[in-house]
Image (tube, grey):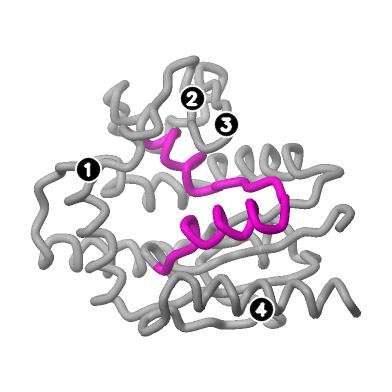
Amino acid sequence: MKNFIIALDGPAGSGKSTIAKIISKRMNLTYLDTGAMYRMVALYVKENRIDDYSAIETHFNNIDMDIVGERFFLNGRDVSEEIRTPEVTKIVSPISAIKCVREKLVKRQREISEGKSVILDGRDIGTVVFPNADLKIFLVASSEERAKRRLEEYQKKGIAQNFSDVLADIKQRDYIDMTRKESPLKKADDAIEIDTTKLSIDEVVDNILDLINRKVGE
């Protein structure tokens, strides 16, 4: 494939990152975890105690982000684990809703993807970042199932959380993501929706691989 763009969107916990990583390896595609980019901004805000989110734009010259494989670096420091903590998760949606943050990161995402075959996962890839993507997938799952998955992720990392709190956070993130003014979470008109609630990872991957092969063969 040459310069083939796959947009993989959906709400928190729908399986985007897990699926995108597998697809990228199977199809030899560049994988860009756009959510991690927003999480790095959120971590910078948290660590620098920036309470007024509207002031973030003045700090962008101090935020240097780099992605090496599946590791994420903020100002030269590996923050791959820190950006996945509940504390960062709580603030990433409101920070992602800020216009200047979205504009700067969307620009960066397009620059990274230029001239490559790429799979990107996020919330506005198919609607804003790459509205002309070759294939658009929109993953969904019940809020309860997504909370269960997120809780399992925390448990594997030794982070203490309870189901009700994680479920509440998932629902709050959904609300913020879907109602924000800038690039709200929504399914592109030409995206193919896949409900992952009762599907295994392998089943979702096989489904998407089939869609890719059919698209390439057109």
Picture coordinates of residue 128, whole percent (x, y): 68, 60
Residue 191 bears which disc, if any?
4
Residue 16 magenta: yes
Provide the residue designation for mark 2.
73
Q: Are marks 2 and 3 in contact (CB under 8 Å)?
A: yes
Q: Which quadrant would the N terminus be assigned to in this image?
A: bottom right
Q: Nearer the viewer, mark 3 or mark 1?
A: 1
Provide the residue designation for mark 3.
67
Picture coordinates of residue 50, whole percent (x, y): 32, 28
Picture coordinates of residue 42, whole percent (x, y): 38, 37
Provide the residue designation for mark 1.
157
Which secondary structure lies at badge 1?
Answer: loop
167 with respect to 215 (left or right): left
Which residue is at the front of the view, 100 or 32?
A: 32
Start and end of the magenta stretch?
14-42
Kindly report the distance in space between the C-alpha atoms of the residues bearing marks 2 and 1: 19 Å
The amino acid type, in three-letter code, at marker 4 is Ala
Kindly report the distance in space between the C-alpha atoms of the residues bearing marks 4 and 3: 27 Å
Which residue is at the front of the view, 105 or 149?
A: 149
First in sequence, mark 1 or 4: give its number.
1
Kindly report the distance in space between the C-alpha atoms of the residues bearing marks 2 and 3: 6 Å
Q: For the point 49% across and 32% down, which residue is it? A: 71
First in sequence, mark 2 or 4: give its number.
2
The amino acid type, in three-letter code, at marker 1 is Lys
Label 2 crowd (10 A; few <14 / some 14-19 / many >=20): some
- In the displayed structure, 155 sits above or below 172; it is above
Residue 3 magenta: no
First in sequence, mark 2 or 3: give its number.
3
Q: Quadrant of residue 27?
A: bottom right
